[in-house]
Amino acid sequence: MFLSVIVLFNCNSNKKEEKQTSVKPNIVVIYLDDLGYGDLSAYGATEIQTPNIDALATGGVKFTDGYASSATCTPSRYALLTGMYPWRNKDAKILPGTAPLLISTEQQTLPKLLKKEGYQTAIVGKWHLGLGTGVVNWNERVSPGPNEVGFDEAYILAATQDRVPTVYIENGNVVGLDINDPIEVDYKNNFEGEPTAISNPEMLNMNWHHGHNNSIVNGIPRIGYMKGGEKAKWTDTEMADHFLVKAQDYVKKHKEEPFFLYYAMQQPHVPRTPHPRFVGKSGLGPRGDVILEADWCIGEFMKTLVEEGILENTLVVFSSDNGPVLNDGYYDDAVEKLGNHKPAGPLRGGKYSIFEAGTRVPFITYWKGKIEPGTSDAIVCQMDLMASIANLIGTEESSTDSQELMDVFLGKSDKGRNNLVLEATSRTALRSGDWLMIPAYKGVNFREKVGIEVGSFPEFQLYNLKNDIGQQNNLAKSNPDKLAEMIQEFEALRGKDYSLNVKDVKFR
Ligand code: NG6
Ligand code: CA
């Protein structure tokens, strides 16, 4: 542990203030993929038990109003790592596996900030922020990537588990690549003679519902075409164990120094491929099984912190990149076996949705001996970790959208954000205090394929979340003054060009 006392001189008053920043704790962000607000027993789930994550919640701060920045993966991860609202970057959309690196190598990032303060930094797990500068040769070192935006070590899957290339990449190099079997990836055209889900359905052991009908890897049809790299391909059912071991090894190797580990788990995103140990264990089908698997992994990971004697010097943040979806393109019983489980809890919508379930997610901070355990209804966003962590370790980060809320994360204050702009597939909305305003948007509200209401209506929506968490009563017409106030606040943050359609719509 590093103990430091920073003496600040306040130039205006010439008074000397003393600010004690006690430590440079290890920082671990455990980030799940598509885990919903209602998917954990700590957040009210009754059909599934997640004891290890619940232990973080009961020993730490459980946020009821904690948000991802977006209702999809890439933009949320972008905001988490850069502290910037994703809608400031027009390319922050769900990326194909061949997309170039989304974060500029000039940009400030959370790992860069920590590196500068003496931290070792690593990512283990899902990246999905693009790699390279355009055309990637997967048979050479792929760069720029995580190493070029602040991570000393990176052991990743490039995009998503359902997208090619289906290989692990370690510090830019495909793991286990055989140079005699080079990898080629294309998101438009198949490679001659290579089987696809359309040409060779007999090779499938998981069926596609929508999308996901290109190359077949391990019997699972994917998004995108891939050729070669046979020996390097991952085994889906072992992915959770594989990343867990990498995360544990990293901790063991770096326990003597302050480290930042971004442990980006792949569950419960599709394809849901629990290890055989977890198959059938939840009774909810593979989606429930992989949630149990993730919970187990987190338990094992936490044990490692204990065994290495660093639990009390490690701040753990747990959250999810966006809300839940059942059918995200495969037939895997997520809908059929759902029973009474409510992945979104009391919230409306889901992944892709500008309704609350898109972005309001489980959010827990845990630091044994340092955090006052409890539940907080402060509004916090993952984007705020950057400025807050900067403050904790005695530095500053004020150039981004990130807000300094470390006392809130430590359970010492309940004064969170006043407001937050939320994003879902290019649409934005404003949370301010208890209120939520969604501008008028064209397009279909109910997306049949995924079975989710995405929140698009041709009129403004206004909800008081305090007494209407399920967003059932649109108060836009009955409370025009509040609506006008919210629009003004929203436009001050977001600018006036948030919707091409919005100006045509009468809201009074
Ligand atoms: C969608 C995929 C979905 C999922 C999502 C990204 C189709 C039809 N759907 O385009 O399966 O991969 O992208 O999810 O291809 S996220 O959590 O990484 O944002
Ligand atoms: Ca996701």
Image: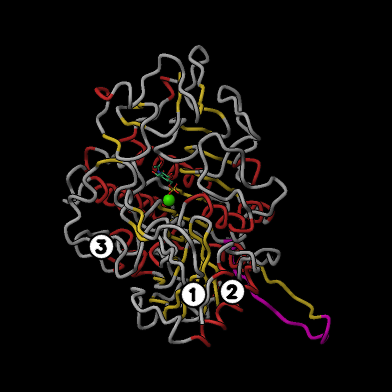
Element marked by disc 1: strand
Residue 450 location in percent, x, y? 33, 51
Q: Which mark is residue 437?
A: 1
Front in this rendered view, residue 349 or 271: 349
Q: Earlier in the sequence, mark 1 or mark 3?
A: 3
What's the CA distance linking mark 2 and mark 3? 31 Å
Drawn side of residue 172 relative to residue 315, left or right? right
The amino acid marked with disc number 3 is Lys
Mark 3, other Cα within 10 Å: few <14 / some 14–19 / many ≥20: some
**Corner quadrant of residue 228:** top left
Identify the residue shown where x is 36% and y is 24%: 196
- Would you say the residues marked 2 and 1 are in contact, meaning their CB atoms lie under 8 Å apart? yes
Residue assigned mark 3: 342
Q: Does the Cβ of the disc 3 residue fall within 8 Å of ligand 2?
A: no
Element marked by disc 2: helix
Residue 106 location in percent, x, y? 72, 48
Of circles 1 and 3, which is in front? 1
The span shown in magenta is 11-24
Q: Residue 490 carries which label?
A: 2
What's the CA distance linking mark 2 and mark 1? 9 Å
